[in-house]
Image: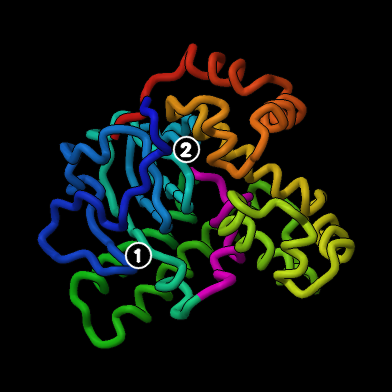
């Protein structure tokens, strides 16, 4: 634990491979990332996306939930911006890591990123760990190999080929997940509006909490925004914003030594007592009670 917000590490941090890391994309071997790097010693996060294709056994920890990676088949592991993550039994894992920004994935400056369409963002449809059966492995394994080859060889238009392979990996994963874990997919005329709202919430949640302000940013009324969000997600825009704030609060309570008041101010609350009341109303426990209950069985995540 520490008294500062959870560190955010740059793309390709601590790679032991010789090739220089590109600004917006890196593809390499998971087992060659330097585990001695001090910055990877504890829980951390990124402002980019990470996709891992790994064979276990091992454990991925994402926002303090443990996900077992089986030894008998590969797993697709997805980490979005802001998620606090790490590994247990890392030395038993091997495979590929692809790190990339939304700018690289889209081939243009967002917002909003088309990554929202693949269920690989905040409020993600895809789970952080997706063990692959023979069918998914048959689709994804050649695409992962293609990602490694394109990044290493840099043939003409390699970036386009790599981007296409990443899209196909996520499309295959989403299709597989929906077939095996049916869920209502967002669709219809409000889908684009909700996608834009989710991107804005991720960008501004620390200093903008008003539904009306987000509605103005999106060029609609607050009433219309709430109606569309409810139709698409089954919740209101205000609840979506508060959920994102409280997710960040839980991350800071678990992974830092910041006081409850410091966390409240960090998240843009002017009154720490109001933050504490809101946290208790939503979670059923005070911030202090939540921290104590988690720490009772929690140990620092280590790479």
**Label 1 near label 2: C-beta < 8 Å?**
no
What residue is rendered at 46% in x and 48% in y? 132
Q: Nearer the viewer, mark 2 or mark 1?
A: 2
- Residue on which the image places disc 2: 62
Give the main secondary structure of the magenta stretch.
loop
Left or right: 64 in relation to 200 = left
Quarter of the image that includes the C terminus? top left
Secondary structure of the residue carrying tag 2 is strand
What residue is rendered at 58% in x and 56% in y? 202
| Residue 131 % position (x, y) | 47, 43
Q: Is residue 172 magenta?
A: no
What residue is rendered at 26% in x and 65% in y? 148
Magenta span: 110-129
Left or right: 14 in relation to 82 = left
In whole angstroms, how far apart are the C-alphas of marks 2 and 1?
A: 26 Å
| Residue 61 % position (x, y) | 43, 34
- Residue on which the image places disc 1: 142
Residue 150 lies in what quarter of the image?
A: bottom left
Which color scheme is applied?
A: rainbow
């Amino acid at each position: 634990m520490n008294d500062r917000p959870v560190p955010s590490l740059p793309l390709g941090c601590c790679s032991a491979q010789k090739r220089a890391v590109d600004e917006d994309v890196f593809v390499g071997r998971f087992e060659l990332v330097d585990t001695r790097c001090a910055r990877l010693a504890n829980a951390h996060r990124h402002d980019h996306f990470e996709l891992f294709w790994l064979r276990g056994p091992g454990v991925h920890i994402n926002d303090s939930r443990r996900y077992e990676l089986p030894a008998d088949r590969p797993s697709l592991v997805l980490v979005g911006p802001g998620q606090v993550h790490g590994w247990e039994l890392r030395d038993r894992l091997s495979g590929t890591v692809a790190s990339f920004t939304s700018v690289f994935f889209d081939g243009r400056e967002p917002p909003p990123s088309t990554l929202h369409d693949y269920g690989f963002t905040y409020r993600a449809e895809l789970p952080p760990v997706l063990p692959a059966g023979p069918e998914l492995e048959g689709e994804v394994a050649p695409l992962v190999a293609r990602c490694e080859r394109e990044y290493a060889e840099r043939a003409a238009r390699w970036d386009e080929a790599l981007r296409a392979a990443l899209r196909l990996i996520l499309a295959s994963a989403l299709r597989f997940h929906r077939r095996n874990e049916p869920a209502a997919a967002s669709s219809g005329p409000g889908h684009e509006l909700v996608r834009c709202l989710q991107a804005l919430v991720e960008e501004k949640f620390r200093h903008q909490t008003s539904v009306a302000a987000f509605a103005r940013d999106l060029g609609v009324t607050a009433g219309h925004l709430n109606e569309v969000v409810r139709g698409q997600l089954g919740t209101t825009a205000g609840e979506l914003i508060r959920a994102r704030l409280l997710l960040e609060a839980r991350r800071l309570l678990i992974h830092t030594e910041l006081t409850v008041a410091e966390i409240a101010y960090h998240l843009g609350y002017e009154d720490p007592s109001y933050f504490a009341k809101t946290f208790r109303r939503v979670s059923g426990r005070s911030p202090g009670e939540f921290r104590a209950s988690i720490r009772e069985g929690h140990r620092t995540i280590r790479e």
